[in-house]
Amino acid sequence: MKIQIVLSGVGGQGLISNGEIMGQAASIFEEGLFATMTAAYGSETRGTFTKTDVIISDQPIGYPNVDEPDVILCLAQVAYDRYVDKFHDNTKIFYDTEMVEPAEGAKGEHIGYDFRAMSIELGDMRTANTIALGVMLKHCALRPDAVKQAIASRFEGKDKVIAINHKALDLGLSL
Amino acid sequence: MSKSVKKFIEGNNAIVDGAIAAGARFYAGYPISPSSEIAEGAAKELPRHGGVYIQMEDEISSMAALLGASLAGKKSFTATSGPGFSLMQENLGLGIMSEIPTVIFDVQRSGPSTGAATKPAQADIMQARYGVHGDHSIIALSPSSVQDCYDLSIVAFNLAEKYRTPVLFMTDEVIGHLRETVTEVEPDPSQIFNRVQPGEDVTQAEFRPYSFSSNMPAPMPAVGGRLLMRTTGSTHDEKGEFGPGPANIDRVTHYLTDKIEKNVDDITITRSYQLEDAEVAFITFGCSVRSTMTAVDILRAKGVKAGMLQLVTIWPMPEKAIRAVLSKVETVVVPEMNLGQLAGEVRKFNDYGCKVIQANRTDGVLITPKQILDRLEEK
């Protein structure tokens, strides 16, 4: 089992944070899983293209970059456009319907939600990435519990942040 | 049982954890991409362990401070990249000549000079071996995973202490910034090597801070202790006093090389991946190992008997292991992110008519499995 995941968008959307949570969930809170994560970002911290490659496998991982994603999250058009040619028939493409216009004839299964609007409704705009993580999770070989533990460990001591992110994850899982 | 903790962290973070686990308690440095997380981590963690972090004015003084701290009895380390590594060469030579243990982490980036500051390369391999003037040998390790960054940091300090010499840890931007699953096992005290001390009954008259009669260094007490410890970068005798006679110069020159080259079996570490029945072999190190592992997997899936020799120690060059591969297979591919620095070394040992193919990438992007396989196809 080897799942190649790309989290893409623009700086400030919490994609690196998502990648770290997935990696921590796989490495620390699952048994027998390996994970790698590489990140690429512009020198500005906000607003420019950002992507994080996450690989989750039950075997040690060699080459850590993702060329053809099995699962991809696109939270910005610039990110979608960059990857659209890399989709294969089984790629699951999760995208933000407000930010991304899917290409006609693109390969793969497109699954769109208005993550940003949903996060505002939930009460915290910063949880859009966590809602998206919840939606993607069943394709990423991670148990919701493991991800919740990773969130709790990452935000240790910040109970409100943990609670809202758990809520956001549950919302994503329910979709 | 030893304490063990699982983490998902960057290679640069694991280096700090490994250094502290090895007993390092002094860091002097000047932050530089892509090594800065090591300085940051050392600044945060060392004071918590009774250690000291000093931000220096440059890499020349950083290297000097490492030697001073080590002479005073502390295990010391620094981290840098290309331009800083160049500045450290002079005092690195002082460390080699004066036989002062310390560890330098070079997170390699594209060069020369400022180069492409944040992009990976593996092009300091020859600088690691020959950057210091004068005949000498050097120990250099190269990690290919975050696990290695932790485990091999401990090995690096052990080798530095055992052989009383600076040790180079030649990592790269890919491994430095790769986040990965790592299990950090706290080493048992028996797994930590601390420099040998003179016996308590040794008098000042008897004490010699240097010895050139075997391939192992003399005991090394801290300066400021019971015994007067003399040291100098000039060619010296057993007492640490200037010794410019021809016979002394010759034996010191031989000794500095022999203490490493004659202990090559103790120092060198290699790993084999699918090598046993291999007909095509890859010889590589550092971040290129990751792409090569995947290339081997792809070939095996196609029924090609491919395997990989990983050089964990890159200096001294693991000659025996390289010869064993060259004498067994018809084709060897050497993937590396430079223009053939390791390939040249592999060719030196090729007395077997083996075809040695280079797979090089120098554009600041990690070499891909496909590029490695393409080079094999082109042969």
Image (cartoon, rainbow, N blue to C red):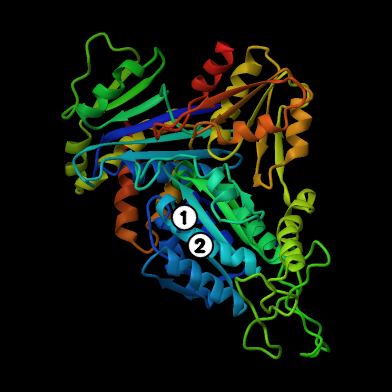
Task: Please give left or right for residue B228 compared with residue B48 in the image.
Answer: right
**Which amino acid is tagged 1?**
Phe
Q: Secondary structure at mark 1?
A: helix
Which one is in front, B145 or B183?
B145
B225 to B16, vertically: above or below = below
Residue B128, position as x, y percentages in the image: 56, 50
Q: Secondary structure at mark 2?
A: helix
On the same chain, marks 1 and 2? The answer is: yes
Mark 1 or 2: the one toward you: 2
Residue position for label 2: B90
Crowd band around label 1 with a 10 angstrom C-alpha radius: few (<14), some (14–19), many (20+): many
Asked if the residues shown at circle 1 and circle 2 are in contact, with their CB atoms under 8 angstroms apart, the answer is no
- Quarter occupied by residue B294: top right
Which mark is drawn over residue A145? none
Extreme residue toward the top, this view: A105
Look at 52% across and 70% down and name the residue there.
B66
- Quarter occupied by residue A101: top left
Disc 1 to disc 2, C-alpha distance? 10 Å
| Total labels drawn | 2
Which one is in front, B300 or B204?
B204
Residue position for label 1: B85
Residue B213, position as x, y percentages in the image: 83, 67
Q: Chain of mark 2?
A: B
**Which amino acid is tagged 2?**
Glu
